[in-house]
Image (cartoon, grey):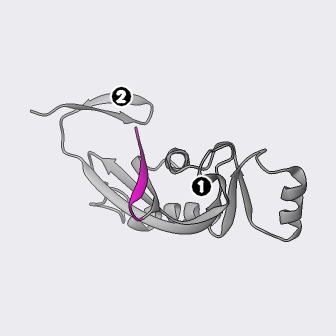
């Protein structure tokens, strides 16, 4: 029999039962740069980012309109889509990496700026999106963020 540990809610639990998995995705286009990086990505550039979020549970709902479902796909799609929309067509940058005058000039032009507490890498986005979905009490277990069709970062707990 196969046993494995899973972090669920605030507890690590030993599981042997079957798991159900759901996956949904959304995408957004944005610009970013990696402040302090020594390479091409130090320059302002853009990506077509794709967020894939995976959800799991060992049981399905047993009553109500979602009977026989892990969770309503509409709820999952909406949560992931809202995340993507909040970053769409924006300049995403690490706080304090732009000169105050530059930031003020961009804001005066009504650009959509999204300052982050972290360097905007695919790895950090994967963790950020995972945490934002957990804050909504969704049973997320893995988030994959593609910055190109061939390159992605995965965050899983």
Toward the left, the furthest residue is 1
Q: Where on the picture, by quarter, is residue 38?
A: top right
As drawn, the label of residue 141 is: none
Q: In the rendered view, does 130 fall on the left or right side of 23?
A: right
Looking at the rendered image, the quarter that the C terminus falls into is top left
Place of residue 128 in the rendered image (x, y in percent of width and height, measured from the top left): 55, 46
Which region is colored magenta? 149-157
Q: Is residue 44 visible?
A: yes
**Magenta part, dominant SS:** strand
Q: Which residue is mark 2?
A: 12
Q: What residue is rendered at 26% in x and 60% in y?
A: 68
Image location (x, y in percent) of residue 43:
66, 57
From the image, tell me which residue sits under label 1: 40
Classify the position of the N terminus by image quarter: top left
Number of marks present in the image shown: 2
Q: Is residue 84 above or below residue 132?
A: below
> Outermost residue toward the front?
39
Please tell me which residue is depicted at 44% across the width and 68% down the height of the picture. Answer: 74
Which of label 1 and label 2 is nearer to you?
A: 1
Residue 135: x %, y % from top left: 55, 45
Residue 111: in magenta span: no
């Amino acid at each position: 029999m196969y046993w494995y540990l899973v972090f669920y809610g605030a507890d690590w639990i030993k599981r042997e039962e079957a798991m159900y998995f759901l996956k949904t995705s959304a995408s957004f286009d944005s610009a970013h740069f990696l402040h302090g990086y020594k390479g091409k990505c130090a320059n302002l550039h853009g990506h077509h980012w794709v967020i894939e979020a995976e959800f799991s549970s060992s049981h399905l709902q047993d009553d109500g309109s979602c009977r026989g479902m892990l969770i309503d796909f509409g709820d999952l799609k909406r949560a992931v889509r809202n995340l993507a929309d909040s970053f769409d067509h924006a300049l995403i940058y690490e706080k304090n990496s732009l000169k105050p005058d530059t930031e003020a000039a961009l804001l005066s032009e009504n650009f959509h700026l999204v300052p982050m507490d972290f360097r905007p890498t695919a790895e950090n986005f994967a963790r950020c999106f995972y945490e934002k979905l957990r804050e909504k009490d969704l049973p997320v277990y893995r988030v994959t963020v593609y910055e190109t069709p061939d390159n992605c970062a995965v965050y899983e707990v």
